[in-house]
Image (tube, rainbow, N blue to C red):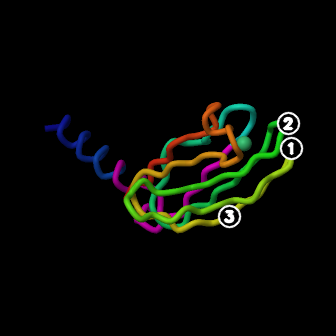
Amino acid sequence: MRRLIVILVVAVYGTAALPAGAGTDAFSFVQVVEKEWTLTLSRPSVRAGSVSLELVNFGMDNHDLVVKGTKAGAKPLTFKQLDPRGRTERTLRLTPGRYALWCSIAGHKAKGMHATLIVTK
Ligand SMILES: [Cu+2]
């Protein structure tokens, strides 16, 4: 009986310890680092809703970024080209699904500048 009470207490505190605002509209952040020839995400997935995306160019060439859902008919979001050491940040409203990210400057995607971001419910 004592063991059961301990388990119950842990279960209750475990639930209470969930962060506030853990709903579907919670704010999320992802940093995208670009350089020759990689595109690295600070986390592989974010929650749906308002997603703050910071793009940083740690390379020696200019780079841009396209974000596009993999569902049919998804519209691409394009970040303008950044100079070396440039950075920009935008808040996107993302629905659940898979998103392809890549640099659209000729040849850069083929050299490895692409990644996938998962947006969860
Ligand atoms: Cu590029």
Number of numbered discs on residues: 3
Q: Which mark is residue 60?
A: 2
- The image quadrant where one finds the C terminus is bottom left
Chain-order first, disc 1 or disc 3: 1
User: In terms of secondary structure, where does tag 3 sit?
Assistant: strand
The residue shown at (61%, 34%) is: 110
Dot in front, 2 or 3:
2
The amino acid pointed to by label 1 is: Pro
Query: In the image, which residues are magenta?
Result: 14-32
Chain-order first, disc 2 or disc 3: 2
Q: In the figure, is residue 40 to the left or right of 86?
A: left
Chain-order first, disc 1 or disc 2: 2
The amino acid pointed to by label 2 is: Met
Rate crowding at label 2 as few (under 14), some (14 to 19) or many (20 or more) other CA atoms within 10 Å. few
Rate crowding at label 1 as few (under 14), some (14 to 19) or many (20 or more) other CA atoms within 10 Å. some
Residue bearing the label numbered 3: 90
CB atoms of marks 1 and 2 within 8 Å: yes
Q: Percent from the top left, x then y, of residue 113?
A: 64, 37
Ligand 1 contact, mark 1 (Cβ < 8 Å): no
Dot in front, 1 or 3:
1
- The image quadrant where one finds the N terminus is top left
The residue shown at (52%, 57%) is: 68
Q: Percent from the top left, x then y, of residue 100?
A: 51, 48
Residue 25 lies, with reference to residue 79, above or below; the image says: below
User: In terms of secondary structure, where does tag 2 sit?
Assistant: loop
Q: Which mark is residue 84?
A: 1
